[in-house]
Image: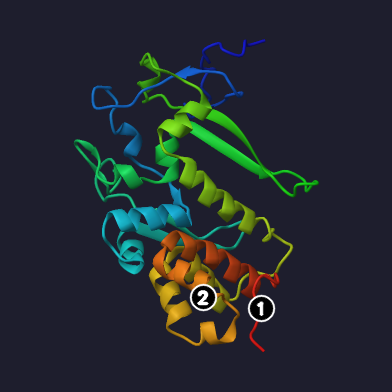
Amino acid sequence: MTRKNAVRQPRPADQSGEVLDPLPKGETYRFACHPGVRCFTDCCRDLHLTLTPYDVLRAKKALGMDSTDFLDRHTVQDTDPTWKIPVVRLKMEDNDVRSCPFVVREGCRIYADRPGACRAYPLGRAVRRSPAGSEGCRIEEEHFLVREPHCFGFEEGVLWTAEAWMKDQGLGPYNEMNDLWMTFLAGYRPGSRENLSPAQWKMFFMACYSLDRFREFVFGTRFLSLFQIPDERQEEIRQSEEALLRFAYVWLAYSLFGDPLLKLRK
């Protein structure tokens, strides 16, 4: 049995060379990533990275782009084969190594707003909702290490726990927003609902990923005259894109799933 404070040692790799190594709470591992590591930015090549709505929000703000331009230039839009919902994936550069469009020699040019999966690397996080109890549903999380053959960061001498790494990398806002996304999707179970119609697919995509268009939908149409939205909440979603994204999940749960989260004006 591994002692609580023992340093996690890697397991043998599978045929793909990648290892997903469970990391129980309190156990430590060695890792560092900086320009002095010989594999610096190698992990930023040939990615198949699905972006969450919050990833899109942070990246497009960092680049000073509106949602439509960012999505057109830097993402590939698709439908998830299982959930049948819109997803966006980061579009790689058209070069020999299929590099990330945001990587330069010095590193990531949107480092402070990089996607959550990049921010967490080499830590992975799996979450689930606990059954409802006296205090309602809670988010339960488990962690694992992603060990890839090209990564030499594990040879560095800095010790981390999962909790310390998440705090150091500023993952708090990402985890909070992505947990909201997961909770929203928990109401949309494959096979339990009909596939989205083309109009519903467009609404889902707009509300989750194209926040500039969703803001126009809320404030530039009859929307606010139809629904009871308190003035303070209107001002909040007008000023904060994070608040607007939270409201988008409420709107979709109401409009697509029939959840009674909004009230029509009489």
Q: Residue at x 28, y 29 (%)?
A: 40
Q: Quadrant of residue 260?
A: bottom right
Q: Amino acid at mark 1?
A: Lys
Q: Is residue 63 left or right of residue 188?
A: left
Q: Is residue 260 left or right of residue 199?
A: right
Q: CA distance from mark 2 to mark 1?
A: 14 Å
Q: Residue at x 72, y 61 (%)?
A: 191
- Residue 258's x, y, as percent? 70, 73
Tag nearer the camera, 2 or 1: 2
- Residue 5's x, y, as percent? 56, 12
- The disc at residue 255 is none
The residue that mark 2 highlights is: 231
Q: Nearer the viewer, residue 127 or 38?
A: 127
Tell which residue pokes out farthest to the front in this image. 232
Classify mark 2: helix, strand or loop. Answer: helix
Classify mark 1: helix, strand or loop. Answer: loop
- The disc at residue 263 is 1
In which quadrant of the rendered image does the C terminus lie? bottom right
> How packed is label 1: few (under 14 Cα within 10 Å), some, or many (20 or more)?
few
> How packed is label 2: few (under 14 Cα within 10 Å), some, or many (20 or more)?
few
Q: Amino acid at mark 2?
A: Asp
Indicate whether 140 appears above or below 148: below
**Is any part of residue 15 visible from this angle?**
no
Tell which residue pokes out farthest to the right in this image. 134
Q: Quadrant of residue 156?
A: top left
In which quadrant of the rendered image does the N terminus lie? top right
Q: Nearer the viewer, residue 10 or 31?
A: 31
Q: Residue at x 43, y 27 (%)?
A: 148
- Residue 52's x, y, as percent? 48, 53
